[in-house]
Image (cartoon, rainbow, N blue to C red):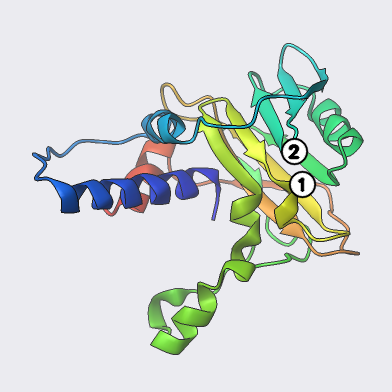
Amino acid sequence: MNFEERLLMELKAEMATRATQEPVRRSRGIMTRARILAVAGITAAAVAIPLTLGGGTAAYAVVKNPDGTLIVTVKELQDPEGLQAELNAQGIRADVTYTPRDKKCAPGRFIGADYGYVSPNPKNMTAEQLEEFNRPEHWRSRDVTRPITRDKFMISPKFMQPGETLVLEFRLGNAPGVGWSLGTYLAKPGSPVRPCTLVDEGGTDAEQAREMAGS
C-alpha cells in the first residue's frame, strides 16, 4: 500500500465518522491525488516542534524532532542520493529512488519485511485469514511514513526493526497539481536493495485515485 492509498484510507475513515454524526449532502466528482493529499494534510499537520535541522537543498530538507521522528520536505525530485545520504546520517537506513512520470520500479528489488511490498489478495480470504492479514505487525511499512502536506511527510523510526531498510520510491505526478507520489516499503535485514529497473506504471494519478475510491 503506497503513500496515497494510506491518505485515502484515512480520509475515507474520517468521512465515515462524520457521516454517523450528521447528515451530509454528497455530490459526485473526481478526487485527484492532489486533493487527497491536501485534505489529509489538514488533519495530519500536528507534529512535534523541530529540534535540529539536518542537511538539505532547495529540493529537499530533513528536520529531526525531539521524539526521534523526521520531517522530510520534498520540493523537487532532484538529488535522490543526497536525500538518501541525509536520512542515513540521521540514523535511517534508506534507499531513495526518483522515477519519471508513468514509470515505476519493477517488483522484486528486495525481500519485503511485511505485506506492504508484496501483498496477498484479500478478496477470497476467510474471516480468520482477513483478521491475520490486517494485524498491524504485517503493515509496519505504512506506519513508518505519515503524510503532513502535499510536499511533506514524517518518518517514524519506531516502526522499523534493526537492520531493515526504508525503501522510498518517488514518482513524478502525471495529473495537474500532482507533484509526486510515494511508495514506502521495508526491506528485510540482510536483503540488498537492487537498482531500480523502470517499467510502465499504467493509469494516471486521477484514474488510480478514482479506482481507490471505488468510483
Query: What residue lies at 75% left-to-right and 33% top-to-bottom?
Result: 66
49 left or right of 180 in image? right
Front residue of this view, candidates 201 and 66: 66
Residue 118 picture location, percent across and down: 62, 66
Query: What residue lies at 57% left-to-right and 25% top-to-bottom?
Result: 151
Q: Which residue is mark 1?
A: 196
Residue 187 picture location, percent across and down: 78, 59
Residue 86 picture location, percent across and down: 85, 30
Front residue of this view, candidates 40 and 83: 40
Q: Amino acid at mark 1?
A: Cys
Q: Dot 2, how many residues are within 10 Å of its Cα: few (below 14), some (14-19), or many (20+)?
A: many
Q: Is residue 157 above or below residue 148?
A: below
Q: Amino acid at mark 2?
A: Thr
Residue 21 picture location, percent across and down: 17, 49
Report if the CB atoms under discs 1 and 2 are less than 8 Å apart. Answer: yes
59 left or right of 134 in image? right
SS state under label 2? strand
Quadrant of the rendered structure where residue 53 is?
A: top right
Q: Which residue is mark 2?
A: 97
Q: Is residue 73 above or below residue 122?
A: above
Residue 56 visible somewhere in the drawing: yes
State which mark lies toward you, 1 or 2: 2
Q: What is the spatial separation of the Cα atoms under label 1 and label 2, in whole angstroms?
A: 7 Å
Q: Is residue 187 above or below residue 94?
A: below
